């Protein structure tokens, strides 16, 4: 193991703990991986003490095209040098919006923001405005940001406010259902359908396992939303550009009324987007539904969106990511088998989930049957062996991962797994 004392990182951690609660700026990071990073390039993170990590966390998803690729940093730096904020409109933001609408094809209009969290709020507000209804259906294990009305935790099967200080009353209008169960949803809607403003979901659940929608599930949800006049919101903050340029909408061929994007849309510059049909989105443009923000359409972010979308159009990385991810998934499984430790490696090549345990996984409840704590323990050991991964089992793959990284990751994984098994 690593000896922490006397390292530059341990000194920086001590200083951080003195002036930053928990030493981190997002509570997600309280559970690691934990080292002090000096720089990042391509598929690698370099720590202040010289460790070269292969990165399979990718900043929780944004660094989909690798860290700081030149095609991105050049236009972003150019935007930074030429006025970051104007308090008016720029040609760059017009191009970014046009490109995004053209890329998504089903969406007529977009609004840009900074975080996924805030765009969830814009979508919910818009859905309530257009329907004149209050109630929202969402799903177990899906994450939609950290604000009072959406942050929940599972306490023995009861979904409750997750944070001290959170106004639990803000959760009153939210009904939390198991996902991937269209019959159950049909029953709920038969009773309450006319009162529901929106159904919001990750169309592929990536925040708890990586679980695809079952056959015809999304189609049935789509039909029920149409029937009851419910706004269907896809939260594609992770899936959006990672599964393909059209995200889950194109992969599964089901069109929502509104969708949210973030993370990979701008390669690491904070940008999020709300996309939708004109009949809904225009209500924001009339001023009737408020969506605001000093930094919305921030110039370096718009440069990043244009650069990313042009890059995805001209050099689509999806085939090589699929190839890399498939090889990595197979390699991890083989290593597990070779040491007599069957590993579950499930999901898509661009985002998959590693765990231990038995049984079919189709939703949050079946996922919880797995031995997730056991993998969390292994994840710590993987980080110590130079593979930067999250405890919750998610692995992201970027376009910058090449065959050298594949060999190295599998080698490190094998050594780490053996070390961990001997304790
Ligand atoms: N929705 C989903 C599906 C997410 O994965 C996340 C972030 N992990 C968010 C919303 C919130 O985005 P942000 O952290 O940018 O506020």
Image (cartoon, helix red, strand yellow):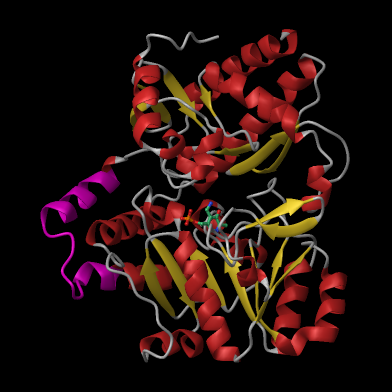
Residue at 67% x, 84% y is: 230
Residue at 37% x, 87% y is: 285
Q: Main secondary structure of the magenta part?
A: helix
Residue at 83% x, 33% y is: 357
Could you tell me residue 329's position as x and y percent? Answer: 66, 32
- In the displayed structure, 1 sits above or below 364; it is above
> Which residue is situated farthest in the left direction here?
82
Instruction: Write down the quadrant of residue 350 in the picture.
Output: top right
Q: Quadrant of the C terminus?
A: top right
As drawn, is 285 to the left or to the right of 423? left
Q: Quadrant of the N terminus?
A: top right
- In the displayed structure, 32 sits above or below 176; it is above
Front in this rendered view, residue 290 or 408: 290
Instruction: Write down the quadrant of residue 7 in the picture.
Output: top left
As drawn, is 218 to the left or to the right of 412? right
User: In this view of the protein, can residue 331 be seen by the observer?
Assistant: no
Could you tell me residue 309's position as x and y percent? Answer: 37, 58
Front in this rendered view, residue 354 or 70: 354
> Which residue is situated farthest in the front direction here?
165
- Residue 83 in magenta stretch: yes
As drawn, is 402 to the left or to the right of 338? left
- Residue 90 in magenta stretch: yes
Tell me the magenta residue range: 71-95
Residue at 76% x, 28% y is: 343
Could you tell me residue 388's position as x and y percent? Answer: 51, 28
- In the displayed structure, 389 sits above or below 417; it is below
- In the displayed structure, 153 sits above or below 250; it is above
């Amino acid at each position: 193991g690593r000896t922490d004392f006397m390292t530059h990182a341990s000194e920086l951690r001590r200083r951080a703990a003195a002036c930053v609660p928990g030493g981190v700026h997002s509570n997600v990071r309280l559970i690691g991986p934990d080292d002090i990073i000096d720089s990042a390039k391509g598929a690698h993170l370099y720590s202040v003490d010289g460790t070269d990590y292969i990165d399979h966390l990718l900043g929780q998803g944004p660094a989909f095209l690798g860290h700081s690729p030149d095609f991105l940093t050049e236009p972003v730096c150019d935007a930074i040098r030429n006025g970051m904020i104007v308090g008016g409109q720029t040609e760059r933001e017009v191009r970014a919006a046009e490109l995004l609408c053209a890329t998504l094809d089903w969406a007529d209009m977009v609004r840009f923001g900074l975080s996924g969290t805030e765009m969830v709020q814009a979508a919910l507000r818009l859905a309530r405005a257009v329907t004149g209804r209050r109630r929202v259906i969402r799903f177990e294990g899906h994450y939609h940001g950290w604000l009072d009305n959406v942050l929940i935790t599972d306490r023995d099967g009861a979904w409750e406010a997750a944070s001290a200080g959170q106004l639990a009353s803000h959760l009153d209008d939210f009904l939390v259902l198991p996902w991937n169960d269209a019959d159950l949803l049909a029953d709920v809607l038969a009773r309450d359908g006319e009162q529901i403003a929106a159904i919001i979901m990750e169309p592929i659940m990536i925040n708890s396992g990586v679980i695809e929608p079952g056959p015809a599930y999304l189609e049935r949800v789509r039909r029920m939303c149409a029937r009851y006049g419910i706004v269907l919101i896809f939260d594609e903050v992770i899936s959006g550009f990672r599964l393909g340029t059209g995200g889950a909408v194109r992969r599964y061929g089901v069109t929502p009324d509104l969708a949210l994007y973030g993370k990979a849309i701008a390669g690491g510059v904070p940008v999020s987007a709300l996309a939708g049909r004109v009949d809904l989105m225009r209500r924001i443009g009339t001023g009737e539904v408020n969506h605001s923000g000093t930094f919305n359409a921030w110039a370096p972010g718009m440069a990043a969106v244009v650069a990313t979308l042009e890059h995805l159009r001209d050099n689509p990385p999806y085939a090589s990511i699929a190839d890399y991810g498939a090889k990595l998934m197979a390699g991890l499984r083989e290593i597990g088998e070779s040491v007599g430790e069957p590993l579950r490696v499930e999901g898509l090549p661009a985002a998959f989930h590693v765990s231990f345990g038995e049984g079919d996984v189709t939703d949050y409840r079946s996922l919880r049957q797995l031995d997730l704590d056991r993998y969390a323990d292994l994840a710590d050991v993987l980080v110590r062996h130079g593979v930067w991964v999250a405890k919750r089992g998610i692995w992201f793959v970027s376009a910058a991962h090449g065959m050298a990284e594949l060999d190295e990751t599998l080698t490190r994984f094998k050594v780490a797994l053996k070390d961990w098994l001997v304790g």
